[in-house]
Image (tube, rainbow, N blue to C red):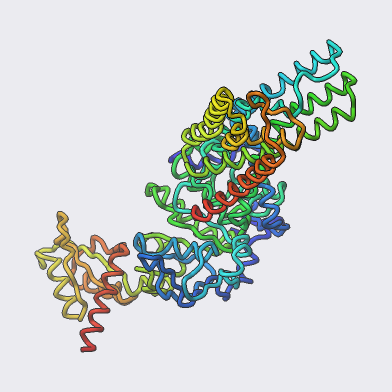
Amino acid sequence: MPGQLCGLTTGVVRVTIVEGVTVIATESLSKRFPRVTALDRLSVDVGPGVTGLVGANGAGKSTLIKILLGLSPASEGRAEVLGLDVATKGADIRERVGYMPEHDCLPPDVSATEFVVHMARMSGLPPTAARERTADTLRHVGLYEERYRPIGGYSTGMKQRVKLAQALVHDPQLVFLDEPTNGLDPVGRDEMLGLIRRIHTDFGISVLVTSHLLGELERTCDHVVVIDGGKLLRSSSTTDFTQTTTTLAIEVTDSDEHPDGTRAVRETLHARGVEVADGSDGLPGAGHILLLTAQGEETYDLVRDVVADLGLGLVRMEQRRHHISEVFKNEEEQRKEAVGHGS
Amino acid sequence: MAVEHPPAAAPGDQTRIHNIGYRSYDGPRLGRSYATRSLYSQSLRGAYGLGRSIKSKVLPMLLFAVMCVPAAIMVAVAVATKAHALPVAYTRYAIIMQSVICLYVASQAPQSVSRDLRFKTVPLYFSRPIETADYVRAKYAALASAMFILTAAPLVVLYVGALLAKLDFADQTKGFAEGLVSVALLSLLFAGIGLVIASVTPRRGFGIAAVIAVLIVSYGAVSTLQAIAYNQGSTSAIPWIGLFSPVTLIDGVQSAFLGATPALPGGHGPSTGQGVVYVLLTLGLIAAAYGLLLRRYKKVGL
């Protein structure tokens, strides 16, 4: 990075100032509609950095964002964003916060530049500053010559970038990104995730990003908050998360000594006290894949040593991406266990 | 997707822009009222297609020209023939040109609000410092201003022409002022009706058709009823019937208080008492339109 720095760079300084402060804090926050409870006594603290908000559809993610923007009153409890109470300081919060909605929100007959300039002015930036910031922001999200063309002709990826640009154009201290990778192909998804990471590391802006894919957020976020049915399921840093939930998939070769290498590894690991499951999820060749829960670094070492001692070849050892449903399943099992122990 | 990352400049190009990293913004943030004014000016410009595609400039500009050309011709005739009065009174002009005005509001009211609903831009506005009421005020004020420009411009042409033709200054100024008050009321009323109808539908076509139906069809129905009443000799009913269409409403207000000749069959304008009802109803409709818009956007939200 030092190669890119020059005298004009003034960003990033703020990161150190914000560090250690709570960006979002909610206290038994509830939102009840006549028929459903969207949020149920949610208490969570979010620090600076990139935070993932994970939940299935209808888990209450969008409702939470609405309340945090001061647009929808909470039925109960309180919430603060950047130290400002959402119930009374909504306008002040919205001046310092950016929002990228999940749905399409761009008029097709204007150019990206015109649209983002207008949105910058709607955030209170004077006309000249609005133009300068628009040019900067569009460049940062990766829109170049095409920014002068009407948005109607853009690809989904480009539209997502414009949506992101309008959320960043007024240099907020915090942005809410609602499902930013929705509708993107794998390459576009990776680029968007990289961009989200840069919003914090390069721009010094804290991020709250929602998704229903946990695996996607594991790579991008410092901290992950999981909600389900409006309740807080888990709030922990990403490293904790992966440590407790990482599943390793292992595949080994067979040798003359061990005609069924897979079985040999399973038995040896079992003898060493590691639970191993078959990866038999109905896929061809799946019988050769072993799944085990990684407790930390030592599990990787153990697998390596066991396979080497048996004289087998290790074809693959990879982290299995988790779908959010697995987390829910695990939580459910734990809850059942707790109940079982209690009775 | 592959072409999403065109190089910022061709290699070897000396005029390449260097990546100087992210720059934060420390300048002023002008807040809610500035944002509301920005939305107002953007919407006002949009009502004449400025800042939008060439295609969207055609209709408003054409209608503006259609509004002004007859005034210019009248002035030319008045100057050339050294007439002692303009062929048409200031207050009468907008009533004669009502179909043009209706077309304008029918085309531009949906343009102003239906687009935001249809492309779901409204949530973006409300994620910024402005509140629901600011959005409604900005949009209402912008369309009313655009309509005032449309209806007042030909009056200015007439007034300047009248002065060039050396008509009586005091007389003309009084008529011009009365005309301006009348078109201001008309702009507020029509903009309100147009926006309320357009804000209900994200489909522009429906919006246009509905506004035309309410403004032009109601006028047709009311004038037919008035003609029937006139033929049957029940002239006292004529002013009351006039309450039921926006055009005859404005006509009644200006006949009662702004020295206009009523455009009613037989020239049966409202009495002063009836005139008060006309004014109250007009102001009530404007307030109701504003109230309905506020209620409508409370629901749209995010």
Q: Identify the residue at image location x=49%, y=55%.
A: B299
The N terminus of chain B appears in which quarter of the rendering?
Answer: top left
Q: Is residue A132 above or below residue A109?
A: below
Residue B202 lies, in percent from the top left, at 47, 41
Residue B88 visible from this viewpoint: yes
Q: Is residue A340 above or below residue A257?
A: below
Q: Identify the residue at image location x=30%, y=72%.
A: A300
Residue B240 lies, in percent from the top left, at 60, 36
Residue A279 lies, in percent from the top left, at 18, 64
Residue nearest the viewer, comparing A196 with A299: A196
Residue nearest the viewer, comparing A205 with A251: A205
Q: Identify the residue at image location x=66%, y=46%.
A: B280
A229 on left or right of A338:
right
Of all residues, the one furthest to the top in this rendering is B81
Q: Quadrant of residue B89?
A: top right
Of all residues, the one furthest to the front in this rendering is B233
Query: Total of numbered circles in the picture?
Result: 0
Q: Quadrant of residue B173?
A: top right
B50 on left or right of A306:
right
